[in-house]
Image: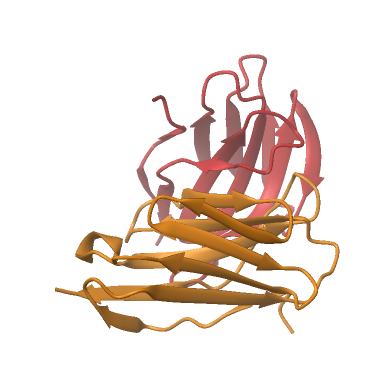
Chain colours: A red, B orange
Amino acid sequence: AAGVIQSPRHLIKEKRETATLKCYPIPRHDTVYWYQQGPGQDPQFLISFYEKMQSDKGSIPDRFSAQQFSDYHSELNMSSLELGDSALYFCASSLTLGGAEQYFGPGTRLTVT
Amino acid sequence: QKEVEQDPGPLSVPEGAIVSLNCTYSNSAFQYFMWYRQYSRKGPELLMYTYSSGNKEDGRFTAQVDKSSKYISLFIRDSQPSDSATYLCAMSVRDDKIIFGKGTRLHILP
């Protein structure tokens, strides 16, 4: 079965640089969620989109922005990167807003040096 | 106090044993309860999803929710070395953001 696709899988950036993470949800899933997982931590919710509109916002820094496109893929844009942004970034998708069954992608490991 | 509390372990049990993993929570508005399994450097994998109090069984896995006590459990029967992973309980109020527990590291000893 098709799963959530994330790219790139690994990304190394320097401080103050910009990064863009991409997420392709499971086909027919219209809701996308972004989570950040620091080393040894549980995933923390960043932001979600339903039908290309932001549906909820968590602890996402102002330096980060995200959007969902007409084909339902989503991109997380991160600017002025800081060392503390180094983490695993997961995207999850669900069949619709109202479906608590979220399926996670493999994650993008971002390292900021 | 964190909304969801989970013992981080590690928990080591011999192969074939029954494993019991637990979480408590403080927000009575939580309606959806999930268990995810996460292998090292991989994304969380949805194992079980329940909406109401009671038990739900899927193969070797049983999820139990007690809303009155704000307590959820995951039982793994006939545990296998391949079950060694971090198990995260997760909850949500409606259908959007999931609040995770810290995760319990489980080791099944051959």
Question: Vertically, is B23 above or below A91?
Answer: below
Residue depicted at 43% across the width and 46% down the height? A107
The part of the image, by quadrant, that contains residue B13 is bottom left
> B65 and A105: which one is in front?
B65
For image coordinates 29% across by 75% down, the residue present is B17
Q: Position of residue A56 (x, y in %)?
A: 80, 45
Image point (37%, 83%), residue name:
B10
Q: Is residue A77 left or right of residue B110?
A: right
Query: At which x and y percent is residue A87?
Result: 47, 60
Q: Quadrant of the C terminus of chain A?
A: bottom left
Q: Residue furthest left?
A: B110
Outermost residue to the right: B29
Whether residue A109 appears in this view of the structure is yes
Q: Nearer the viewer, residue A46 or A2?
A: A2
User: Can residue A81 be seen at all in this image of the molecule?
Assistant: no
Q: Where is A56 relative to B57, above or below? A: above
* Residue that sits furthest to the top in the current view: A70
Q: Quadrant of residue B16?
A: bottom left
Q: Is residue A67 above or below residue A47?
A: above
User: What is the tally of numbered marks visible in this picture?
Assistant: 0
**In the depicted structure, whether residue B98 falls above or below residue A72:** below
Residue beneath the point at 21% across and 65% down: B81
